[in-house]
Amino acid sequence: MNTWFRKALDIRKGEWGRTGLMVFYIFLIICSYLILKPMTRSLVLKKLGPEKLPYIYMLVALVSGVVAVTYARLSARMRLNRLINTTTLFLISNLVIFWWLLNSGIKAPWLYYVLYTWVSIYGVLTVSQFWLLANYVFNPREARRIFPILAAAAIGGGITGGYLTKALVKPVGGTHNLAFFCMAFLGITMLLMNLAWRRRAQVSEAPSRKG
C-alpha cells in the first residue's frame, strides 16, 4: 500500500520533506483565506449593505495596484524568505488590530471598507508568495510532478476553511474571533516556509559538496 501510494504521487527520494512542508503551507494559507473571506463579507453586508459592494470593489482594485508596485520594489531589495517572513508578521499584526477594533465595538463604516479590501489583498498576496517560494523550492522537473499535488492541497484547504467557518463561528463567540485561527495558521506557515527554504538550500549545496 505504501509503495503504491508513493508511485501514485510520484514523489521521489529527497522530495518528501519539501513536498510535505509546502503541502501544509498552501493548505493553511487557503484555509485561513476561506475563513476570513466569508467572515468579512458577512460583516460588510450586515454593516454596510450590498449596495456598497461596487465601491469596495473599486477600492480593492486601486489598493491592489499600489500593493503590487510596493511589493515589487521590496522584492528587488530583499531575499524572498526574508520578505515572506516580514510580510507574514505584518499580516498577523494587522489581524490583531482588526480583531481589537471589531471587538471594541467600533461601528465606523471605514473599518469595513478597509477590512474587506485588506482580506482581498491578503488572498492574492499570500498565495502569490507561496508560488514564488514553490518555484525556488522545486526545480522545473520536480515542479511538473509536485505542483498538481500542491494545487490539490489548496483545494483541501479551501474545503476545510469553509467547514471551519460554519462549525466554529458560534463556539468561538462571533465571526471576528475566527481571526485567532488565521493568526495561528499564519504563524505556522512561517515555520513551514523557513524549513522548506533550508531544505532547498541543502539540496542545492549537495552537488557542490560531491563535486
Image (cartoon, helix red, strand yellow):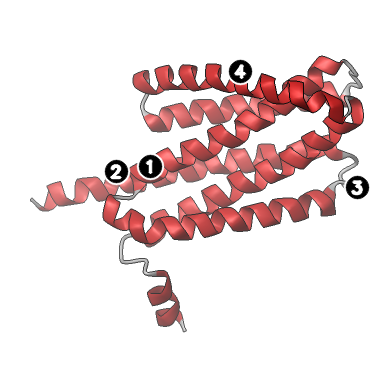
Mark pair 1, 3: CA separation: 38 Å
Neighbour tally class for label 4: few under 14, some 14-19, many 20 plus, Cα within 10 Å: few
Q: Tag 2: residue type? A: Ala
Check disc 3 and report the residue beneath it.
170
Q: Are marks 1 and 2 in contact (CB under 8 Å)?
A: yes
Mark pair 2, 4: CA separation: 37 Å
Q: Residue 157's x, y, as percent?
A: 63, 53
Name the residue at 41% across, 38% down. 132
Check disc 2 and report the residue beneath it.
201
Residue 42 against residue 79 in the figure, above or below: below
Eye-nearest disc, 1 or 3: 3
Q: Residue 46's x, y, as percent?
A: 91, 31
Q: Tag 3: residue type? A: Lys
Q: Is residue 96 visible?
A: no
Q: Tag 4: residue type? A: Leu
Element marked by disc 1? helix
